[in-house]
Amino acid sequence: MKQNLSVEEALEMVLQEARPRQTIEHLPLAASYGAVLGEDLISKVHHPSADDTSVDGYACLEADTRSASLGNPVRLRVIGQSPAGKPFSGRIGRGEAVQVFTGAPIPPGADAVIRVEDTLREGEFVWLMKPASATDIRRKGDDLVEGQTYLRKGDLLTPGRVGLAAAMGYATLPVVKRPRVGILSTGDEVVEPGEALPYGGVYNSNSYSLAGLVVEAGGEPVILPKISDSVEGLRTQLQRAGQLDLLLTSGGVSMGEYDIVRRMLEREGEIHFWKVRMQPGGPLLFATWNGLPLLGLPGNPVSAMVTFLLFGRPLLFKLLGRTDPPLSRRRAIADTPFEANPTRRAYRRAVLRWTEEGYRVATTGNQSSAVLRSMAVGNALVVLEAGVSAQPGEIVEVIPFPGTT
């Protein structure tokens, strides 16, 4: 078992143990938002499927309209309409026009379109106040070409990508089945919200904040019933967990007499590392138990959330085969002081905002790892190397919380 690793060393070990999932399921379009594409997708169609108009107006021959102007309009005979979905079936000849509506195919024979606002309708004729042109014609395959690949394995299915898949002709999508992530809180003092809080008790916030982070990262959370501080209870709960791809525990990984997760894994599992040189979240543990990867997160609420963001989220991204980075990074101007830890990298909760001068960042206040509200009002972590504080006006590295900025 390795101890006191750097954040980079620990993350490398976590990712080495992560095996991308091979299980693919097919979901309807409406159920696929937020899933990860399991295969490359080629377009089944051209889009547009034919030359069409991007405006309402009249399709005609460009040569008929070259002399048109406000003072010398050109008159064409309207021989029909071409609404979207009901294309004109005939052919346009010299001196003729067809009224077209946005998205409608350009009738055979036409090579130009005039916008309706540049025309005047008079019975079966239309007057053109300027020349028609091909500018507003969208060519067949301008957007999508049949047989071309536009979405790739590992892409996160955003609303835009789901819409693109629909335009490519897919009713269902092959996606990576979401990893099932067990979430287990330990400690005799932990009480479920809604129950009476005994003296010395604390409500179980970790299970629910971690479940939200798991969903946000693309996993399926499975909140397990809490256990008391006994190795026997922990072992029984793990055996009952069923088929999981990852287990998150909160609490029980430090050096105390009641830190049962670490003690059980020392006897029955394989501990890859314990402790990381970071604050908060130093007593992080990573292990394998009966082939199941286990992240033993600290019990303090902030520590649990920060360590999941830095280690659990990248692990889930690798299990899913996602191609986008699990976390983004920014450079920001500090508006308040940020205090370093003398021996460990520090991650300070902060509020990141955009201004005309660029990103600026300020502390959320009390940085105790028990102050959970800092994770509610904050939207970013300021990264400080060991012994390196930051003063107002200095540039700092910032990790925005996913989905915030």
Image (cartoon, rainbow, N blue to C red):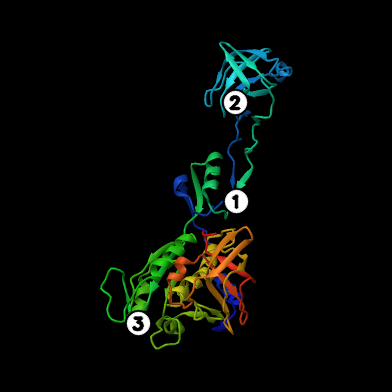
Residue 404 placement, left or right of 394: left
Q: Residue 105 carries which label?
A: 2
Residue 118 in the image: state x and y as whole percent: 63, 22
Give me the residue at 45% from left, 87% from top: 255
Q: Residue 310 carries which label?
A: none
Q: Quadrant of residue 68?
A: top right
Location of residue 204 with respect to 156 vertically, above or below: below
- Mark 2: few/some/many CA within 10 Å (<14, 14-19, 20+): many
CA gap, disc 3 and disc 2: 71 Å
Give me the residue at 49% from left, 57% from top: 23
Mark 3 or mark 2, which has the lower sequence index?
2
Helix or strand or loop: what does disc 2 sit on? loop
- Answer yes or no: is residue 5 visible: yes
Q: Quadrant of residue 53?
A: top right
Helix or strand or loop: what does disc 1 sit on? loop
> Which residue corresponds to mark 3?
229
- Mark 3: few/some/many CA within 10 Å (<14, 14-19, 20+): some
**Three-letter amino acid code at disc 3?**
Asp
CA gap, disc 2 and disc 1: 30 Å
CA gap, disc 1 and disc 3: 46 Å
**Three-letter amino acid code at disc 2?**
Pro
Q: Quadrant of residue 405?
A: bottom right
> Which residue corresponds to mark 1?
152
Give me the residue at 58% from left, 53% from top: 153
Mark closer to the observer (1, 3): 3
Mark 1 or mark 3, which has the lower sequence index?
1
